């Protein structure tokens, strides 16, 4: 997830005043996409869920790489 301006080959979505931009080629592979802002005891941030399979990491189960 990054800040970006819409380009000609992008899908653009607006949800409650927040604009989301997704490349068409990526959107076709991951749709549907669900973006939530969550707050928990560990902190807060965005949770993004889609149908795209998660690629295994080469650094084990740690999220620090």
Image (tube, grey):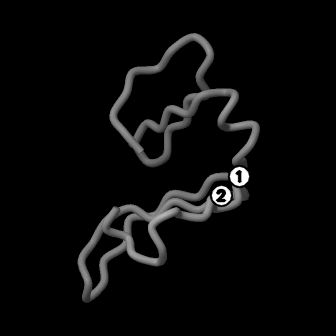
Pointer 1: what residue? 32
Pointer 2: what residue? 50
Q: Is residue 7 above or below residue 41?
A: above
Mark 2 and mark 1 residues within 8 Å of each other at the beta carbon: yes
Image spot of residue 8 (x, y percent): 57, 11
Q: Is residue 1 above or below residue 13?
A: below
In the image, is 15 to the left or to the right of 17? right
Q: Where is the C terminus found, in terms of image quarters?
A: bottom left
Q: Is residue 44 above or below residue 28?
A: below
Residue lying furthest top: 8
* SS at mark 1 in the image: loop
Mark pair 2, 1: CA separation: 6 Å
Tell me which label, 2 or 1, sits earlier in the chain: 1
Image spot of residue 46 (x, y percent): 38, 61
Q: Where is the N terminus found, in terms of image quarters?
A: top left
The number of numbered badges drawn on the structure is 2
Of tags 2 and 1, which is closer to the observer?
A: 2
Nearer the observer, 1 or 58: 58
- Name the residue rendered at 70%, 55% in the picture: 52
Query: Callout 1: 10 Å neighbours few (<14), some, many (20+)?
Result: few
Image spot of residue 39 (x, y percent): 31, 77
Quarter of image, res 9: top right
């Amino acid at each position: 997830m990054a800040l970006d301006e819409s380009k000609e080959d992008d899908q653009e979505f607006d949800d409650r005043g927040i604009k989301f931009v997704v490349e068409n080629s990526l959107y076709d592979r991951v749709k549907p996409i669900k973006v939530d802002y969550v707050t928990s005891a560990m902190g807060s941030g965005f949770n993004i869920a889609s149908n795209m399979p998660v690629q295994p990491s080469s650094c084990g189960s740690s999220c620090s790489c």
